[in-house]
Amino acid sequence: MHVAIIMDGNGRWAKKRGLPRIEGHRRGAEKVEKVVEWASDLGIDYLTLYAFSTENWRRPWEEVNFLFKLFVEFMKKKVQRMKKEGVRIRIMGRREGLPDEVLDVWNWVEEETKDGRKITVVIALNYGGRAEILDAVRRIVKDGRKIESEEDFREYLYIPDLPDPDLVIRTSGEMRISNFLLWQIAYSELVFLDKYWPDFEKEDLEKALEDFSRRERRFGGIR
Ligand code: IPE
Ligand code: IPE
Ligand code: MG
């Protein structure tokens, strides 16, 4: 089972409380630690979390900077504990444009947690679905590779062995995809939650899974 989450609404969560947006991001990061625990307890094999999109560069540089700082701090603080719990962390996105310190942490956490077998947590960072497809096409052209099938194409995605998400959850009430995993979500079930990310609780995850279990997936066929 692969659950992917668009963690949205940190800014509005903070605004509602008269706090700066970065405070919302701080609370959002705390929630990341929790959701990894919950997902692992619930037996989810893959958890993908959308942390920073290729479009999020449009925000004020102070906020962008803070988000990268938060990523670095979070990893440095939490990786050993997660490693003990059998978490494998993978980062997915475009490396170009990211600060060196972020790239160093990227390489380090992947190496450090590569033997984790309980759950794989994928952090989508500087990630865009269109960028991923474009990057794939560029590499295909460079390799002079002939693509005969979807499987051939998949080899060129950022993480080729990542199964497609079964379920995508978006918080904050927005009902859009915002350039998340465009190739991979072709047949994912979608759950939109009217709640800001820092308010996300274990019950919300359980409820989304329950909702998912009642969906009838047909993949274009008939039952
Ligand atoms: C999601 O929260 C986190 C990121 C996109 C980095 P937002 O920062 O988008 O919060 P809202 O949507 O403005 O409330
Ligand atoms: C999607 O949220 C990206 C992440 C959660 C990292 P955004 O807040 O960037 O999406 P839009 O701008 O509302 O579509
Ligand atoms: Mg948002």
Image (spheres, grey):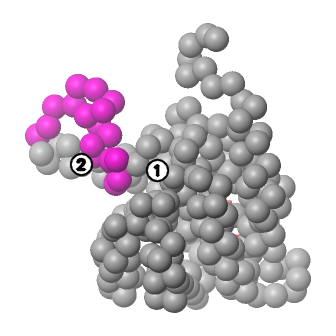
Decide: is 111 above or below 189.
below
Dividing the image into 4 quarters, which one contains the C terminus? top right
Residue 44 picture location, percent across and down: 58, 52
Residue 191 picture location, percent across and down: 73, 45
* x 40%, y 54%: residue: 131
> Secondary structure beneath disc 1?
helix
Residues rendered magenta in the picture: 144-161
- Using the rendered view, name the quadrant where residue 158 is placed: bottom left
Residue 198 picture location, percent across and down: 76, 72
- Report whether 106 appears left or right of 36: left
Q: Name the residue that disc number 2 marks.
A: 138
Any part of residue 112 in sight: yes
Crowding around mark 1 (Cα neighbors within 10 Å: few <14, some 14 to 19, many 20+) is many
In the rendered structure, find residue 129 and report the number of the disc placed on it. Answer: 1
149 in magenta: yes
- Report whether 140 appears left or right of 171: left
User: Outermost residue, right direction?
Assistant: 17
* x 54%, y 57%: residue: 47
* x 32%, y 40%: residue: 154
